[in-house]
Amino acid sequence: MVWLLLIASLVGLGVFIERAIFFHQAQISLADFLKGLRNCIRRNNQTEAITLCDDAPGPVGRVARAAILHSDRSRTDIREAVDATAIQEERRLEKNLPILWTVAQAAPLMGLLGTVIGMMKAFHKIQADGRLVTATDLAGGIWEALIATAMGLAVAIPAYVAYQFLLSRKNELIRDMEICATELMNVFAQVERERRKDEFDLSEP
């Protein structure tokens, strides 16, 4: 069981490193990104806006790209396009996280199972040897059995902390996607109002 726990710890470590690197590369400066998009949209330069989205790593740029590509449609159509892209990006963000959660939940149980098996062996030895068993032999068997529990906790606690850390990073990126989509829709609406106002002013005698 200890070998299984060692394998589980290596799997959890690999998932944490891969996800930590992924989240780090996906993080952008949202304020600067939105500032650049607002300038492009106000200048009616959709090509430059899409280029900015393509150059931005991570899910925020892809959500913004979906919004810009549908900016000439209704607000409902824009929201549907953004939501569809956000769902795909959220799935990408959650990749491999269930593995780390499983390691955090299963490691203590695996350690407990190892301890139970060790205790069963210890009591079997007592039954087999009868009165010849000493307190030292019994203590040694119990000590060896408890190693599995300690190992399970040693694997589970860091895995749980790592999972919570990655979950917070994932939620932060999801919030950035929501903020970006809302901000762009507000910019689209403002640009449309200004365009209609200019058309109305030009139509006046």
Image: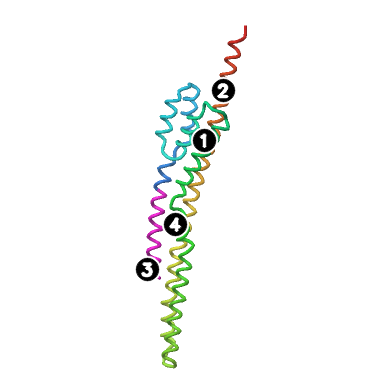
Residue 29 x, y percent position in the rendering = 46, 36
Residue positioned 50% across, 40% down in the render: 86
Q: Amino acid at mark 2?
A: Glu
Q: Amino acid at mark 1?
A: Ala
**Mark 2 residue element:** helix
| Disc 4: which residue | 99
* Crowdedness near tag 1: few (<14), some (14–19) or many (≥20) residues, C-alpha within 10 Å: some
Numbered label tally: 4
Residue 157 x, y percent position in the rendering = 47, 61
| Disc 3: which residue | 3
Residue 54 is covered by the magenta coloring: no
Which badge, 2 or 1, comes first in the chain's sequence? 1
Quarter of the image that includes the C terminus: top right
| Disc 1: which residue | 81
**Image quadrant where residue 103 sits:** bottom left
Residue farthest toward the bottom in the current orientation of the protein: 131
Residue 183 x, y percent position in the rendering = 54, 32
Which badge, 2 or 3, comes first in the chain's sequence? 3
Spatial distance from mark 3 to mark 1, Cα to Cα? 48 Å
Q: Magenta segment range?
A: 1-20
Which badge, 3 or 4, comes first in the chain's sequence? 3
Which badge, 1 or 4, comes first in the chain's sequence? 1
The circle drawn on residue 98 is: none
* Crowdedness near tag 2: few (<14), some (14–19) or many (≥20) residues, C-alpha within 10 Å: some
| Disc 2: which residue | 192
Magenta stretch, overall SS: helix
Spatial distance from mark 2 to mark 1, Cα to Cα? 19 Å
Q: Amino acid at mark 4?
A: Ile
* Crowdedness near tag 4: few (<14), some (14–19) or many (≥20) residues, C-alpha within 10 Å: some
